[in-house]
Image (cartoon, coloured by chain):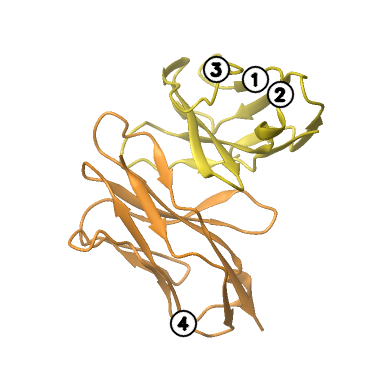
Chain colours: A orange, B yellow
Amino acid sequence: GDSVTQMEGPVTLSEEACLTINCTYTATGYPSLFWYVQYPGEGLQLLLKATKADDKGSNKGFEATYRKETTSFHLEKGSVQVSDSAVYFCALSDSGGSNYKLTFGKGTLLTVNP
Amino acid sequence: GAGVSQSPSNKVTEKGKDVELRCDPISGHTALYWYRQSLGQGLEFLIYFQGNSAPDKSGLPSDRFSAERTGGSVSTLTIQRTQQEDSAVYLCASSLLAGVQETQYFGPGTRLLVL
């Protein structure tokens, strides 16, 4: 079945540091890939997505590129801010019969210190 | 416009009681989903609605869990005879259509604690 593996946290960085959160996936079809973010006390929000190989999703300075050859969708940001402190979830929805279902990684807690 | 809303935001109940959790999706969204977020299991899919029908209930953990959707809008997730292992955050999401490229928009969740 489908699965998503993302780096375990917690990740602690200083403001303006570079961020990479690794995410790899296993899928039987042609998935779309997503990064969701959960800020403290809030619900899940879509951060970015990519729907086909080599697509790059970007938003709020974050980027992730859909790499089919390495089955990866790593999240990157060049300079993090304190306000980026949150839990980040990598997710996929697969083509085929259950194409409505999101499969999530376990989440990575990011803390950015001033 | 308004996002997905859920109520109550928090619910504390005693083991063995029934609970109902409500979800109001974004207006016009045909697809609705329930997920559960717990410490041990992460985010798990529970059930999917297309209109008022539930083509996939495969994620419901037991027959104590049921859900319905009426008028193609509001959905209710019911847990009967609650157990302590039901304690979790229950998330509702909706999307305009169902499909691999569709974005699901999540509500803030209902935090359920079973004592």
Q: Are marks 2 and 3 on the same chain?
A: yes
| Marks 2 and 3 in Cβ contact (< 8 Å) | no
* Residue that mark 2 sits on: B82
* Mark closer to the chain start, 2 or 3: 3
**Mark 1 belongs to which subunit?**
B
Is A96 on the left or on the right of A85, as rendered? left
Q: Which mark is residue A18?
A: 4
Alpha carbon separation for disc pair 2 and 4: 45 Å
Apparent side of residue B40 relative to residue B55 in the rendered image (left or right): right
How many residues crowd around disc 3 within 10 Å: few (fewer than 14), some, or many (20 or more)? Answer: many
Residue A19, compared with residue B52, is above or below; it is below
Residue lying at 56% horizontally and 31% vertically, measured from the top left: B25
In the rendering, at what x and y percent does residue A112 appear? 61, 76
* Mark 1 residue type: Thr
- Mark on residue B69? 3
Eye-nearest disc, 1 or 4? 1
CA–CA distance in space, label 3 to label 4: 44 Å
User: Residue B78 has which mark?
Assistant: 1
Question: Toward the viewer: A92 or A16?
Answer: A92
